[in-house]
């Protein structure tokens, strides 16, 4: 790293000239900056440490040494890549956010660490913790200027002393790809268990939850019930208003059912216009109340689709898990399904009458 004032970036020199006009503290941290002469002196001291050069060049991440004013006095060669610089000497005197082109670092004369945003930035927090003598590790997002893509970083800071002065070793690892892979994995996992239209559990996820509930029920002898739900006249809705209207009704029915369930209940789309509900720690009487409540809510609701008012009634059948008779969850579902079609027949007869 060259140590001549000629290699200081122009914006840092401007900061030096403006230092006298800055308040000692801003939104979050001190705006004070070291003089050019002070930065060059500190850079020479760190560059003279042979172990510093050997270790910093062996680190694949960005490594910075920051002084008490949070300015870079030494860096390994990775600052060129992270800061899009021509050579490493250009980072001397910059603050980390300025090197990384964080858009918030240029919102005030004080630069990185002095805006309201900086109070929530993990990197700024880690640096201050280190300068106060504490090690820290944080994650942060850096929104950058000039259409540069956002960076997601994990930063480590360690307090160190050299010649009686306090510094911070600041290590930066780009975790953008790691985070994107984690988001993709989460999306894939959701697709495996969620119904794409309604975004509630699919049939596979329901059976996994129900089988876990059977094990829990047998162990603690707690009851649970199953409700089967089927929309009334759904074919007529599709034939009359079209399949997009049918999909919209399915999604609205999902929201209606969810509003009438507890957090511990499990709602899943069983297939087509059928839904299934798992009610833990709920016997037949309690389950019947839930079924009646959601049927009543559907009878009272009309869905407005474009210029059409579409009735959204549905029928619901309930069955309680029987410890001595049921071999698996299919036995409970079978009884709930029979109950559903009895209810559906009664409700159809009432509408005809």
Image: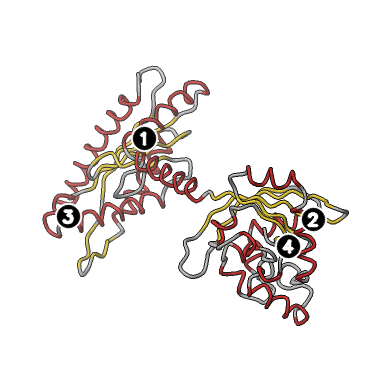
Circle 1 or circle 4, nearest the eye: 4
Q: Which residue is mark 4?
A: 70
Q: Earlier in the sequence, mark 2 or mark 4?
A: 2
Q: Residue furthest bottom?
A: 21
Nearer the N terminus, badge 1 or badge 3? Answer: 1
- Which type of secondary structure does the marked residue at label 4 adopt? loop
Q: Nearer the viewer, residue 221 or 166?
A: 166
Label 1 or label 2, whichever lies nearer to me, is 2
Residue furthest toward the right?
Answer: 164
Q: Residue at x 77, y 52 (%)?
A: 48
Q: Going 73% across and 76% down the picture, which residue do you hit?
A: 16
Residue at numbered disc 1? 206
- Residue occupied by mark 3: 243
- In this rendering, is residue 143 above or below 251? below
293 versus 98 height, above or below:
above
Q: Secondary structure at mark 3?
A: helix
Q: Callout 2: 10 Å neighbours few (<14), some, many (20+)?
A: few
Secondary structure, mark 1, is helix
| Badge 4 density bin: few <14, some 14–19, many ≥20, Cα 10 Å | many
Can you tell which quarter of the image residue 75 is in?
A: bottom right
């Amino acid at each position: 790293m060259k140590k001549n004032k000629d290699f200081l970036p122009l914006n840092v020199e401007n900061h030096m000239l403006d230092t006298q006009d800055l308040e000692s503290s801003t939104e979050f941290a001190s705006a004070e900056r070291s003089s050019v002469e002070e930065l060059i002196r500190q850079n020479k001291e760190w560059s003279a440490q042979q172990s510093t050069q050997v270790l910093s060049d062996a680190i694949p991440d960005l490594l910075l040494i920051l002084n008490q004013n949070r300015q870079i006095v030494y860096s390994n060669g990775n600052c060129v890549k992270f800061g899009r610089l021509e050579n490493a000497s250009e980072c001397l005197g910059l603050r980390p956010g300025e090197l990384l082109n964080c858009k918030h670092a240029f919102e005030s004369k004080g630069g990185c660490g002095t805006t309201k945003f900086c109070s929530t930035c993990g990197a700024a927090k880690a640096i201050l913790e280190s300068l106060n003598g504490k090690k820290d590790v944080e994650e942060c997002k850096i929104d950058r200027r000039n259409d540069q893509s956002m960076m997601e970083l994990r930063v480590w800071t360690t307090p160190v002393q050299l010649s009686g002065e306090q510094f911070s070793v600041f290590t930066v690892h780009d975790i953008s790809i790691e985070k994107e892979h984690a988001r993709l994995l989460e999306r894939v996992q959701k697709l495996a268990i969620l119904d794409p239209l309604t975004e509630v559990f699919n049939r596979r996820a329901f059976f996994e939850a129900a089988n876990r509930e059977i094990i829990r029920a047998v162990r603690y002898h707690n009851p649970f019930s199953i409700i089967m739900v089927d929309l009334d006249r759904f074919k007529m809705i599709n034939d009359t208003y079209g399949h997009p209207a049918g999909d919209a009704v399915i999604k609205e029915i999902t929201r209606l059912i969810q509003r009438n369930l507890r957090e511990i209940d499990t709602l899943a789309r069983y297939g087509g216009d059928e839904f299934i509900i798992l009610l833990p720690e709920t016997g037949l009487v309690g389950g019947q109340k839930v079924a009646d409540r959601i049927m009543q809510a559907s009878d009272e609701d009309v869905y407005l689709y474009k210029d059409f008012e579409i009735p959204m009634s549905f029928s619901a059948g309930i069955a309680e898990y029987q410890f001595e008779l049921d071999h698996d969850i299919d036995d409970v579902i079978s009884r709930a399904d029979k109950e559903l079609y009895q209810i559906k027949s009664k409700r159809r007869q009432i509408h005809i009458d």
